[in-house]
Structures are given as C-alpha cells and as structure tokens.
C-alpha cells in the first residue's frame, strides 16, 4: 500500500512532526482501521514533556493519538465478528485480556501493564492504524466519529471518576469540578445526567467559566484560595461532597483538600505531580482519595449509550491532518475549548 501521513513524536523534547510512513498491514488477529478522527490530549503533552530518563513509553518515533475512531479497512487472518466498513471507536487501554483485571473488562489495570496506542504502541493520529484485537473495537453506530471520538478518553475517564463517587452524590449534595477543559467539560455534563447534585466549577479565567456554565455548571468561581469560602458558603459551611480535580497540580490538590467535607470523595484525574495527603490530620476524617486511570471496556460502552441518548456531547475543534501540529500548539498554549480533533481524511 502507499505511504500514509502520520503525526509523530520523533525526538525527546521536540514538538510533533507530520511525516510519511508505510501503511501497516494487519497480522493474524489484527484489524486495520482507516482513521476517521483522532483526538489530541493533554496526556500527549505529558509524554512529550518527559525527559530522556523519565520517558517510559514506546521507543521513538511514536505515532500519537490514543483517542481514535475509524472504519474497518482490512482484517488479519482469524478475525471474526468484524465487518469491513464498520464504524468503530478504539478502546484505548489495551491489556493482556487474560488476567483477573482484564477478565472484568478493567484492561486499564491489566496485571501485565497496558499497551495503549499512541502511548506504548503507534496510535491513530494517522491515516491508518492497527488495532491488536477485535475486543478493543466498540461499535459507533450512527454517531458522528468526529464529534464522538473523544468518548474514548475525554468522556470515559470522567465517567469512571464520577461513577466512583456516585454513592456520595445523593440528591441535594454538591460536586466541585476543577478545570473545565477537555475532560472537565464532559464531567460537568455527566454530573448533570447522572445525579441531582449542585455542580460547582473552578477554572482560571472568565471565558473558561462561561464555557462551564454553557455546558451545565450551576455555580462557577475562579480557581484560587477564595473559592474555598465560596464553596463553603454554598454548603452550609460543610464543604463539597465530592471534588474532581481535572488539573492535578499542587495548587488544585490543595484546594480539593481544603474544600472537601467530612466523609467526602476527592478524585484526582489530571495528569500532573500534585497530591492530596490523606491522613488523620491532613484532610477531614473519613475522606477518600482516588487517582483515576482511564476506564474499563464496559464503561466505554456505557458512555457510548449516554452519547446516543444525547445526555453528553463533546465540544470539538476540528483540524485537518496538515493542521495537526497547530492543534497541539493550541493545546499546549491552553487555547483549545473542549477537545481538538484531527480528521485525517481532510
């Protein structure tokens, strides 16, 4: 087959480059997808920001893109139950499929470690992509791939986060979302769809807070120490029942620890080096802290059902393949509203 275009991270410390590489051929058991959409994510920035000694991902070059939608172009020998031309999403956290975690669909927590595309193997920021196993394909049905490609991470990850805290989010409770970006703006919608909680959003600028209100936030405050009193003021001085930190830096972790109520849940989703110290004297008693790792296969199926019902929709900025490097520059600069999606067919 002819060469294909791909966006690759090629040398440590550089920015992603558009290159021509060979179109891959599916080996037995594999599927070749013609990519219809690929999402750009802050975790890609985390990967590209790692120093040579901390870089623990696929040896370079790495084709980026762990949020992928496509149509089945070709199948390797032995692949069953997959139709050529079928529109699918790629479940990203590829596990071994055989360990205890994988047997539960929790491939994100595979005992052998995960082999996610765009992170530990070549991803979907390209015209074609290899998927290792048919079980990692989730039917997209009639949903628009460009608008829904980010269900695979930008919705799946916050869905796992919100789902984990649902026992605390009974009617009349208060949930705080820190950061209304790619994942946070979906978390707001998930909280509105799945709970009768009051949703409070913290972010660093008025336009980001206006966007949060647009997608369903009940109250918004600038993300600074003053927000602690604002949240306490809404909750009879008790604090929030759950705080979801989609930033993950130390200042946001500190806010979460100071605005959570007794027996509340703090859920950290943002990939950064911030941490909430859980101890008898560091947070209110009986507080639970959790760091979220992506999501399970069944959770992705549930997220697709929510999208089909119109309960959530991802705000998308569309880019052609030649604009992919520019999409990452906008993401890097914090200018993307919602999710940046590259459409290789454009």
Image (cartoon, grey):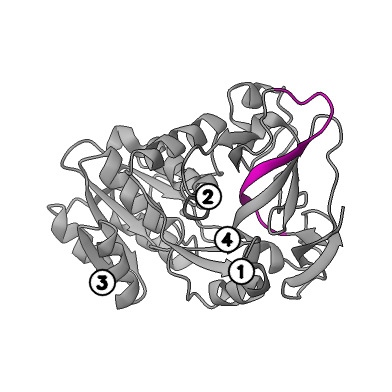
The answer to whether residue 111 is seen in the rendering is no
Tag 4: Cα neighbours inside 10 Å, few (<14), some, or many (≥20)?
A: many
**Among all residues in the image, which is located at the extreme left?**
236
| Residue occupied by mark 4 | 41
Magenta residues (range): 64-80
Which badge, 1 or 3, is on the more N-terminal residue? 3
Secondary structure found at label 2: helix
Quadrant of the drawing holding the C terminus: bottom right
Instruction: Give x and y (percent) for residue 320.
Output: 61, 69
Relative to 291, is 136 on the left or the right? right
Let me know if residue 90 is in the magenta part. no
Instruction: Give x and y (percent) for residue 34.
Output: 70, 49
Tag 2: Cα neighbours inside 10 Å, few (<14), some, or many (≥20)?
A: many
| Residue occupied by mark 1 | 320
| Residue occupied by mark 2 | 145
Instruction: Give x and y (percent) for residue 14.
Output: 76, 75
Q: Residue at x 78, y 55 (%)?
A: 56
Tags 4 and 1 touching, CB below 8 Å? no
């Amino acid at each position: 087959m002819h060469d294909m275009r791909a966006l690759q991270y090629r040398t440590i410390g550089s920015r992603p480059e558009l290159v021509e590489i060979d179109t891959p051929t599916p080996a037995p058991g594999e599927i070749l997808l013609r990519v219809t959409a690929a999402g750009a994510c802050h975790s890609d920035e985390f990967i590209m920001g790692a120093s040579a000694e901390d870089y623990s991902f696929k040896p370079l070059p790495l084709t980026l893109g762990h949020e992928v939608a496509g149509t089945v172009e070709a199948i390797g020998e032995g692949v069953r139950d997959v139709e050529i031309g079928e529109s699918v999403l790629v479940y990203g956290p590829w596990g071994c499929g055989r360990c205890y975690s994988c047997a539960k669909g929790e491939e994100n927590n595979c005992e052998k470690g995960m082999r996610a595309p765009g992170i530990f193997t070549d991803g979907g920021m390209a015209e074609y992509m290899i998927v290792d196993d048919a079980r990692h394909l989730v039917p997209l049905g009639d949903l628009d791939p460009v608008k829904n490609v980010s269900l695979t991470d930008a919705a799946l990850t916050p869905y796992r986060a919100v789902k984990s805290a649902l026992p605390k989010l009974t009617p009349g409770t208060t949930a705080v979302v820190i950061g209304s970006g790619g994942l946070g703006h979906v978390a707001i919608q998930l909280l509105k769809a799945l709970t009768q909680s009051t949703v409070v959003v913290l972010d660093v600028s008025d336009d980001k807070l206006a966007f949060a209100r647009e997608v369903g936030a009940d109250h918004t405050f600038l993300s600074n120490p003053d927000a602690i009193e604002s949240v306490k003021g809404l909750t009879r001085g008790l604090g929030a029942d759950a705080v979801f930190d989609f930033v993950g830096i130390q200042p946001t972790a500190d806010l979460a620890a100071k605005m959570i109520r007794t027996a509340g849940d703090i859920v950290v989703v943002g990939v950064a080096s911030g941490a909430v110290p859980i101890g008898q004297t560091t947070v209110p008693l009986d507080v639970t802290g959790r760091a979220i790792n992506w999501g399970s296969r069944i959770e992705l199926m549930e997220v697709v059902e929510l999208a089909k019902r119109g309960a959530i929709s991802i705000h998308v900025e569309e880019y052609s393949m030649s604009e992919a490097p520019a999409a990452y520059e906008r993401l890097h600069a914090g200018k993307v509203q919602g999710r940046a999606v590259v459409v290789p067919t454009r």
